Amino acid sequence: MDANPTLDQLQVFLAVAETGGFSAASRQLNRAQSVVSYSIANLEAQLEVALFERGGSRQPRLTEAGKALLADARRIVADLQVMRARARSIRQGLEAELSLAISVMVPSEAVVAALRGFRDRFPAVALNLTVGELGVVMELVAGGRADIGIGGALLRQDDLLVAERIGHSFMVPVAAAEHPLGRIGRPLTIADVREEVQLVVTDASGLTSGRDFNVLSYRTWRVSDIATKHQLIRGGLGWGGLPAALVRKDLARGRLVALQLDAYELGEYPLYALRRSANPPGPAAGWLIEAFRQRLATCPSRADFSAMLRGGAAKDTAKDRAGGAAG
């Protein structure tokens, strides 16, 4: 019977391929370089193919066979991690602590409702909550600093992550009612916004480094978070896109104006529940994912949102008239 590669050999193979050399892999694995080289040589002998090209002083490079087998090695290691994690979950039962990362795109009402139910159902489970922009949620989950991520922005393919679509959200370009763009009162062109300050959130994760989304102005102010961007736009210091759920009341009450700007891409953003494949959800995490799914599945579409705003504006106007008559 042919000898099968061991999990240890596959992990060494992945380390060499990902770090780019035997020396770097030995440091990552905290093993002697000779041990790393011996493991690779044994693996190549068992598979009867060369995995790396070795020549002179150059760093070892994957052969065509090595490139083809790298994906298999990753899948096998990931599957074994899933098996171990599932056994650990069965052994440990209910989580003692849960780390949750949530995107600012998730409506605050859904967050509060889901976490209120979580508190009532799992009072003994400690919760660590981080709210992030753009790629931060994905980075926290992929790096093991969050057990669950609720958000969008799947900015890269990662076979070690499981993403389940559980809802949607969308951005709305807005400005303060007293801002020059807010007073134009007609559909806007790129020429209208080019010279106006656009407020843009910088991605702290670095996953979108060098990439801008819906940045149309020549003049930009970059801020670290959505909350600051929201306050500056409300203060009339610029225009920009904000999550629809965040600005709904501002729009309905006339503090902000939704800009009719065809150049601004208005597609809906899918919202996902993210977790590592090697970390299957325990009872508390599974319940929380389902709680968010139920609430986000009922998020309004863009058409529903527009109708909601028209209705809200009419109600606020009626209230103001009633107040004036009573005063």
Image: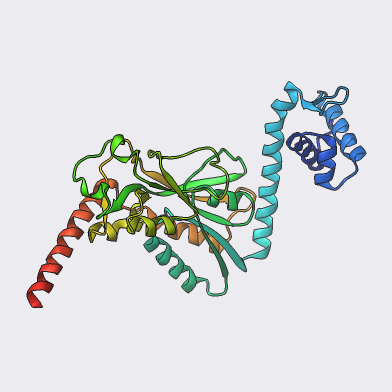
Judged left or right of residue 29, residue 106 is left
Residue 66 in picture, x, y percent from top left: 75, 26
Q: Nearer the viewer, residue 12 or 218?
A: 218
Q: Residue furthest bottom?
A: 327
Q: From the viewer's perspective, is 42 left or right of 120?
A: right
Q: Identify the residue at image location x=24%, y=46%.
A: 303
The quarter of the rendered structure image containing the C terminus is: bottom left
Q: Can you see residue 274?
A: yes
The x and y percentages for residue 285 are 54, 60
Q: Quadrant of residue 23?
A: top right
| Residue in the foreground of this view, choosing between 312 and 289 | 312
Residue nearest the observer in this picture, 90 or 248: 248
Q: If the image is split into quadrants, where does the N terminus sit? A: top right
Q: Position of residue 7 (x, y in %)?
A: 78, 42
Q: Is residue 94 visible?
A: no
Residue 87 sits in which quadrant?
A: bottom right
For residue 142, side relative to residue 267 (left or right) = right
Vertical placement of residue 282 versus 40, above or below: below
- Residue located at (81% from left, 34% from top): 21
- Which residue occupies 29% across, 48% down? 301
Q: Position of residue 157 (x, y in %)?
A: 57, 38
